[in-house]
């Protein structure tokens, strides 16, 4: 990662931190995928209608078959929910029926979960 030296004075500790973060991200991204994923960050709500609960998080990456979501709540594998994906120029979120295929810790206080899309939720 190159930092423009004319704009900002480089701090070796910060540079080391960024290199470590990039390395961790590369290891995390090496998982096998059934479809090409794009790194795309959007706010997401995991809507659990049976529990009248919403979990708020952000997408990490997305494909035509699913999405990875980062949030502070563990989600059970096999759980079905409506994902509300908030977009920049749309007043209402896009709603997608989905199933959690996996969930694992992402650091000490957060979780990454992989969701498979089933279709748009129409209500």
Image: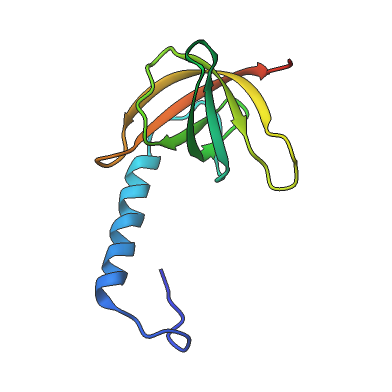
Quarter the C terminus occupies: top right
Q: Residue at x 54, y 14 (%)?
A: 49
In this view of the protein, which residue sits in the foreground, 24 or 53? 53
Q: Position of residue 23 (x, y in %)?
A: 31, 54
User: Residue extending furthest bottom?
Assistant: 6
Task: Report whether residue 44 is seen.
Answer: yes
Location of residue 83 in the rendering, given as x and y in whole percent from the top left corner: 58, 26
Quarter of the rendering containing residue 17? bottom left
The quarter of the picture where residue 10 lies is: bottom left
Q: Residue at x 43, y 12 (%)?
A: 78
Image height of 100 relative to 50, above or below: below
- Residue 75 is left or right of residue 80, and the answer is left
- Could one spot residue 37 in this view of the protein? no
**Residue at figure coordinates x 30%, y 79% from the top left:** 11
Q: Hey, which residue is sitting farthest front in the picture?
A: 52
Left or right: where does residue 116 sit relative to residue 87?
Answer: left
**Left or right: 6 with respect to 109?**
right
Q: Residue at x 64, y 38 (%)?
A: 86
* For residue 109, side relative to residue 58 (left or right): left
Please give the count of numbered marks on the rendered protein: 0
Q: How is the image coloured?
A: rainbow
Q: Quadrant of the N terminus?
A: bottom left
In the image, residue 54 lies at what x, y percent?
50, 26
Q: Quick check: 113 above or below 11? A: above
> Residue 25's x, y, as percent?
36, 48
Q: Quadrant of residue 92?
A: top right
Q: Is residue 4 above or below residue 30?
A: below
């Amino acid at each position: 990662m190159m930092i423009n030296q004319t704009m900002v004075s480089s701090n070796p500790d910060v540079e080391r931190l960024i290199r470590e973060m990039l390395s961790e991200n590369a290891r995390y991204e090496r998982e096998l995928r059934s479809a090409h994923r794009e790194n795309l960050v959007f706010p997401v709500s995991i809507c659990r209608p049976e529990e009248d609960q919403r979990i708020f998080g952000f997408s990490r990456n997305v494909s035509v078959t699913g999405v990875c979501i980062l949030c502070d709540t563990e989600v059970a594998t096999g759980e079905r929910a409506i994902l509300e994906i908030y977009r920049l120029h749309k007043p209402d979120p896009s709603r997608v029926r989905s199933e959690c295929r996996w969930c694992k810790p992402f650091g000490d206080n957060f979780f990454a979960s992989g969701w498979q899309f089933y279709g748009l939720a129409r209500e």
